[in-house]
Image (cartoon, rainbow, N blue to C red):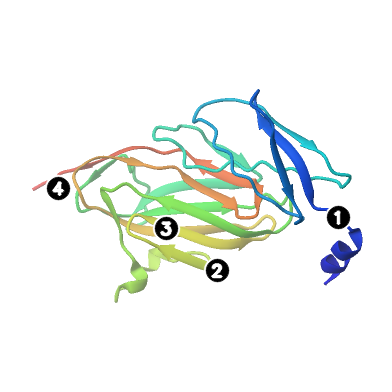
Amino acid sequence: MAIAKYTGKSGGSGINASYRINTEDFVDTESKKSLATYPIDPKPGSKGTLQVINKSKDVLFARLILQGIPVKGDTTEAANNLKLSVVYKSMKGDKINPRLLEQGTGFIAEVTLTNPGILGKYQQLALSQIFPSGWEIMNTRSSARAETNTTASAFDYQDIRDDRVYTYFDLNPNQAKIFRVMLMATYVGRFYLPATSCEAMYDHTISARIPGYWVNVLPASK
């Protein structure tokens, strides 16, 4: 209600601006609303400059949001106001090397996320875990047998799909949460494990990423 009253009294005339990328021609943007979104399509791997000109008498806040999936083989690691670590363990809790697994091996992906306490409470964090096609996710929620060693911290919602798990949660200052996914090395071959990432859904200054790498599933020994 307070925001609505303030907006009603501010008498803003909407958005009247122009933008261009690099040396391209300016694109005029005009809207009577107080918020407008315009998609741009930069070329992958290219660098450039975005220029915005405000033609109105109102204050204009410009925000550039870049999103995407890291390319295969991306070895970059990121930690922006959020700590993220990933370890893989056997069903007994011992650490294992996920790069080389035998077919039929059951194991656990354990992710730990920590709020360093710099920016207060983090809300609506989204953890994205995408797994290689040679691994299968063992959904213990639909199984009659619940594994005690896959017990995780509390979360708001979790979406378990064929090859990925999305977990949504909040994180208090200086708090750490652990999330576990039970997996099975099912298919023999060489597969790519994509990066594990987490970010605040509405604050892109809070994010973290662990790079992906190749993994191998070997035939089961006789």
Q: Quadrant of the N terminus?
A: bottom right
Q: Which residue is mark 1?
A: 12
In front of the other: 72 or 14: 14
Q: Residue at x 89, y 45 (%)?
A: 57
Q: Residue furthest top?
A: 23
Query: Do labels 3 and 4 touch, CB within 8 Å?
Result: no
Q: Residue furthest bottom?
A: 144
Of mark 4 and mark 2, the one earlier in the sequence is 2
In front of the other: 154 or 2: 2
Q: Position of residue 72 (x, y in %)?
A: 39, 35
Element carrying mark 1? loop
Q: Nearer the viewer, mark 3 or mark 4?
A: 3
Q: Which residue is mark 4?
A: 220
Q: Which residue is mark 3?
A: 165
Q: Nearer the viewer, mark 2 or mark 1?
A: 1
Query: What residue type is disc 2 on?
Result: Asp
- Spatial separation of the CA atoms under disc 3 and disc 4: 26 Å
Query: What residue type is disc 4 on?
Result: Ala
- Spatial separation of the CA atoms under disc 4 and disc 2: 38 Å
Answer above or below: position of 123 versus 69. below
- Spatial separation of the CA atoms under disc 1 and disc 3: 43 Å
Q: Which residue is mark 2?
A: 156
Q: Nearer the viewer, mark 1 or mark 4?
A: 1
Q: Quadrant of the rendered structure where residue 46 is? A: top right
Q: Position of residue 127 (x, y in %)?
A: 51, 54
In front of the other: 186 or 47: 47
Query: What residue type is disc 3 on?
Result: Val
